[in-house]
Amino acid sequence: MTTVDRPGAKAEDGVAEDEAAEDGVPEDEAAGWRFPVWRSVVLGVALLALLGGSLGYVLHARERGGARRDVAAEASFALDRPGLYYRDAASGRVAREGGPVGGPSCERFYAGGERALCLRALPGTPVRTEAVVYDREFTRLQSVVVPGIPNRARVSASGNLLSWTAFAVGDSYAVSGFSTRTSVLDLRSGYLIKSIEDIPLTVDGVRYHAADVNYWGVGFAADDNRFYATVSTRGRTHLVEGDLAGWSARTLRENVECPSLSPDGTRLAFKKKVSDDPAAPWRLYVLDLADLREHPLAETRSVDDQAAWLDGDTLGYALPAGSGRGSDLWTVPADGTGAPALRVPGASSPVAVRT
């Protein structure tokens, strides 16, 4: 497996040798700048924050009963029939609606084509995430370990591309000061991009650099090249369209988080910030890619999840549940009509498997 930390970057500082820019300043206005001392200070502060955030996460897990034991899938459990699969909160394992709870233990789960992706937190501090790739029979094919807390997982419809996001610092998008690390794995070539944050980014038509750039919530188009994601910088979030082969990304509009591409590739479900209240900042919307018009969904509660298209008309997502179940799986029509419906109590990470 070929691993690349940041394509086109110097190994010692993660910045391309022929590129140097003042934070948040267009490329052509920042030539000649270097910040070796500043980088050292920031690195030290980030390391302290990472250690502190990881310790807090571990202590929180212990208060809730300790880390779960890593459990492999039962031999009889597979993605062998169409239906809704998800993570069962009670066991921490992958389950099938109306069927058994027999998959591997995961904290985040997704599947596409002939592949499945499972994220789990490894024991110890600082916290690390293991991304495990399976086939449909849940035979373990390979794994990648990255720093941080498991957060988002996606697999392209073909199963060729996988992406995951981990919190490197912090554990919520609702607070300031968090930092993410988003990776992309191409199973066709074995090429692993450990972090996409140095992909050349164009904001409002101008090449952009900033030290606080974070990406999360990657979703792939049917061509296994184009992708959509959220990029955050200077306190604002943007929807980006990326080109893996061309290694570039451009913003399409602001205030879009955790985009999820519809099966026909024409719409994006996303969470939009509608309030400064950290307890309820988001609402689910759908964006038409043809004209970038949006409409809210009937779900009015704040959803902190990357919604999944269960079919061309229905979205699935997790909401916090009572009675210590962790989360419940809900559905809502994608056209803004109807009402939210509880689909599976005590569940998260929904994916519709098709054969």
Image: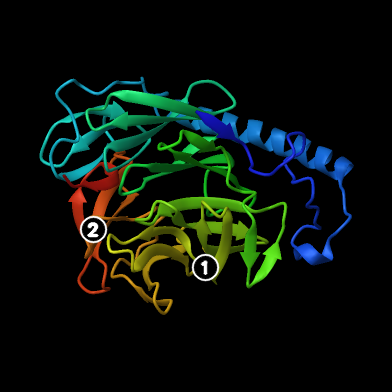
Label 1 element class: loop
Sequence-earlier tag: 1 or 2: 1
Q: Residue at x 30, y 36 (%)?
A: 115
Residue 322 seen from this side: no
The amino acid type found where label 1 is placed reads Asn
Label 1 belongs to which residue? 255
Residue 88: x and y in percent read 25, 36
Foreground residue among 217 and 29: 29
Picture quarter with the C terminus: top left
Q: How many marks?
A: 2
Q: CA distance from mark 1 to mark 2?
A: 23 Å
Foreground residue among 243 and 105: 243
Q: Which mark is residue 287?
A: none
Position of 259 with respect to 45 (left or right) is left
Q: Is residue 230 above or below residue 82?
A: below
Using a 10 Å C-alpha cutoff, classify the residue at mark 1 as few (fewer than 14 neighbours), some (14 to 19) or many (20 or more): some
Label 2 element class: strand
Foreground residue among 341 and 14: 14
Q: Residue at x 41, y 53 (%)?
A: 219
Residue 70: x and y in percent read 36, 21
Quarter assignment of residue 72: top left
Q: Is residue 95 above or below residue 207?
A: above
Quarter assignment of residue 103: top left
The amino acid type found where label 2 is placed reads Thr
Label 2 belongs to which residue? 331
Residue 90: x and y in percent read 26, 32
Residue 208 seen from this side: yes
Q: Residue at x 42, y 62 (%)?
A: 271
